[in-house]
Image: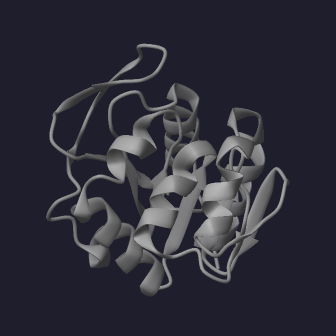
């Protein structure tokens, strides 16, 4: 239980990529972390493949001081998440505080909209590589990239490496 006393926020919205929410949540819980699902406006969300999720709370009002990391899953959820200033502010403030920010697949859209990619090296789903480059990032095609406190991966196949690097950062 290497992550005892660590609190992780997982941002959720409709059409989240089921594996990119549940695999990290369960893996981090396995390590002893407390994982909270934070939504934008609803209590219930369904993943792209229909798996249901009940949010523990809202991003609006979430305090950076209460979390050690924030994870942004892919699927279509990032396109909905980035429309909420509360999400962008929370991600931006977590990054500014040097806390772990994890983003996988299309989640790079949230990082771009939050304005935290300039000068960073990241990976993402290949279809949004132009978006992250236009936001000032150095895009690379790797299973996982760690740039200071930022951990990024491309797709569900990369989840083991993604979780490994998040756990490593949280143990520093």
Image quadrant occupied by the C terminus: bottom right
Q: Nearer the viewer, residue 83 or 28?
A: 83
* Residue at screen point 60% across, 80% down: 118
Q: Position of residue 119 (x, y in %)?
A: 67, 83
* Residue at screen point 34% across, 65% down: 88
Q: Position of residue 54 (x, y in %)?
A: 25, 30
Q: Nearer the viewer, residue 105 or 62?
A: 105
Please identify the quarter of the rendering in which residue 133 is found: bottom right
Q: In this view, does 148 lie above or below 17?
A: below
Does residue 113 appear left or right of residue 19 in this picture? left
* Colour treatment of the image: one colour
Does residue 137 appear left or right of residue 135 in this picture? right
Q: In this view, does 43 lie above or below 116?
A: above
* Residue at screen point 41% across, 43% down: 79
Q: Where is residue 17 in the image (x, y as percent from the top left)?
A: 52, 30
Q: In this view, does 47 lie above or below 3?
A: above
Q: Residue furthest top?
A: 50
Residue 137 in view in this figure:
yes
Q: Which of 107 and 26 is in front in this view?
A: 107
* Residue at screen point 53% across, 71% down: 100
Please identify the quarter of the rendering in which residue 89 is found: bottom left
């Amino acid at each position: 239980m290497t992550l005892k006393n660590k609190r992780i926020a997982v941002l959720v919205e409709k059409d989240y990529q089921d594996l990119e929410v549940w695999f990290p949540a369960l893996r981090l819980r396995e390590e002893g972390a407390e994982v909270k699902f934070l939504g934008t406006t609803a209590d219930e969300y369904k993943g792209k493949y229909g798996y249901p999720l009940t949010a523990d709370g809202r991003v609006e009002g979430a305090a950076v001081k209460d979390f050690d990391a924030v994870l942004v899953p892919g699927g279509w959820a990032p396109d909905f998440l980035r429309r909420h200033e509360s999400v962008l502010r929370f991600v931006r403030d977590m990054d500014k505080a040097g806390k772990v920010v994890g983003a996988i697949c299309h989640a790079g859209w949230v990082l771009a909209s939050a304005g935290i990619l300039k000068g960073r090296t990241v990976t993402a789903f290949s279809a949004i590589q132009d978006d992250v480059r236009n936001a000032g990032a150095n895009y690379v095609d790797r299973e996982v990239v760690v740039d200071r406190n930022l951990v990024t991966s491309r797709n569900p196949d990369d989840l083991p490496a993604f979780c490994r690097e998040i756990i490593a950062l949280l143990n520093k």
